[in-house]
Image (spheres, rainbow, N blue to C red):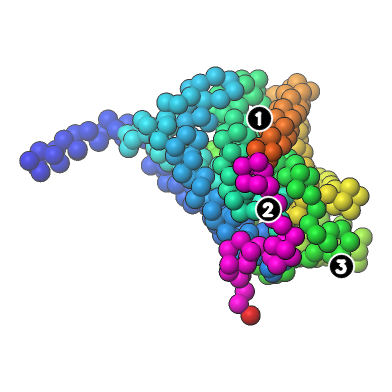
Amino acid sequence: MAALGLVAIIGAMPAAAEGLSGANTAWVMTCTALVLFMTIPGLSLFYGGLVRTKNSLSVLMQCFTITCLVSVLWLLVGYSLAFSDGNTFIGGLNNVLFAGVIEGTLANDIPESSFALFQMTFAIITPALVVGGFAERMKFSAVVLFSALWLLGVYVPVCHWVWGGGWLSDIGFMDFAGGAVVHITAGVAALVAALVLGRRRGFPERPLPPHNMTMTVTGAGMLWVGWFGFNGGSALAANGDAAMAMLVTHISAATAAMTWLSIEWLRYGKPSALGAVTGMVAGLGTITPASGFVGPGGALIIGLLAGCVCFMATIFFKQRLKIDDSLDVFPVHGVGGILGCLLTGIFASDALGVFGGQQDINIGSQLGIQAVGVIATIAYTGVATYVILLITGVLVGGNRVDEESETQGLDLSAHNERGYDL
């Protein structure tokens, strides 16, 4: 019987493997690990170092819990609603609990299981990015409930619009790796959360500096490396698009970091490590939607603009408007995503010579399409996030911790642990 079973398995292998690319499968699986690495430990350390000592563990806990929570929700219904057949707004329920996703099913020429897992890592990092908007003042119960509702109510629909065959895909909106799907949604949600919860106690009267820049720079380095999987893996193949996406990602990150620290150097007399890593993230977020469409020359300009525009946005929102988006999620990710989506409509064109990309597009028409996608994503995310925060607040008795808990720090008040036992 065992021999007969082995013969049956071997006989079925060619049919199951027909059309399967081992090289592309290996590449996407590698990129999946890199993107997960971006959240745990990359983003966790990056954010954990930026908050004060008494809240460092709470941020690590929030990122870790979101990773677990989103993984389960993606299995239950998230993947199906994002990528199975439905309508132009939302997918269907054909793949609930990954129904139909078996060893032999393919997404193009890679296993569908690999594709679903790769997309899961994108779904994980997006609500984790939002944590930076309400860091140091949101109840842990509210974080968990908000992240669950936001994933299903905001991320999943926008993901379907762009990548799952929805209406933005139908009109030709270009977002290679998540400028709108990840960065605009996360940035707008963080801004709305910061406004709804209000400022941290002490802001802006006194500085609330990062407690551990070594941790933050370490996390930033992990994000930079992981971003090769984020953008390069979005080609879903080990090909020229993936290679170019990695190249332009690196160029934009390096250029934006140098731009940001140079502005600081000229303006304040000294460049800061915080400025360098923040500029890097701005460059990475801004190149993300364009990464599979533009060339190295375009990436240089995109990185330069990302460093300038996101720097000015950070100053404007924090110092002029005094909005306490704790870790500058909207000025960096939101503004970067908006800028990147719009610049994609320009630098993706093959008509710009050394600064052009690989796409045969009309710049004016494509810019219009990109603007529609940006406006729709901002509007939907803003309204939906506000409603979700209202619902969350009712269900958990308020989104924000009380004054005593905030003063004590969320490490002890929420988890009865310390990030540092000194």
Q: How far is disc 1 from disc 3 in space, using C-alphas?
A: 38 Å
Q: Residue 270 has which mark?
A: 3
Residue 160 lies in the magenta-colored region: no
Spatial CA span between label 2 and label 1: 35 Å
Q: Say which amino acid is labelled 2.
A: Met
Secondary structure beneath disc 3? loop
Residue pictured at 91% horizontal, 67% vertical: 269
Q: Nearer the viewer, mark 2 or mark 3?
A: 2
Mark 2 neighbour density, 10 Å: few (under 14) some (14–19) many (20 or more) = many
Looking at the image, which is closer to me, 296 or 75? Answer: 75
Disc 1 residue type (three-letter): Met
Tag in front: 2 or 1 = 2
Q: Which residues are magenta?
A: 392-421
Give the number of marks.
Answer: 3
For marks 2 and 1, the one nearer the N-term is 2
Bin the neighbour count of mark 1 within 10 Å (Cα to Cα): few under 14, some 14-19, many 20 and up.
many
Magenta residue check for 412: yes
150 relative position to 72: left or right: right
Residue that mark 2 sits on: 138
Along the horizontal axis of the image, is 59 left or right of 7?
right
Residue 88, percent from left and from top: 58, 20
* Proximity of marks 1 and 3: CB atoms separated by less than 8 Å: no
Relative horizontal placement of residue 82, taking residue 197 as reference (left or right): left
* Cα gap from disc 2 to disc 3, whole angstroms: 34 Å
Labelled pair 2, 1 in contact (Cβ < 8 Å): no
- Mark identifier at residue 174: 1
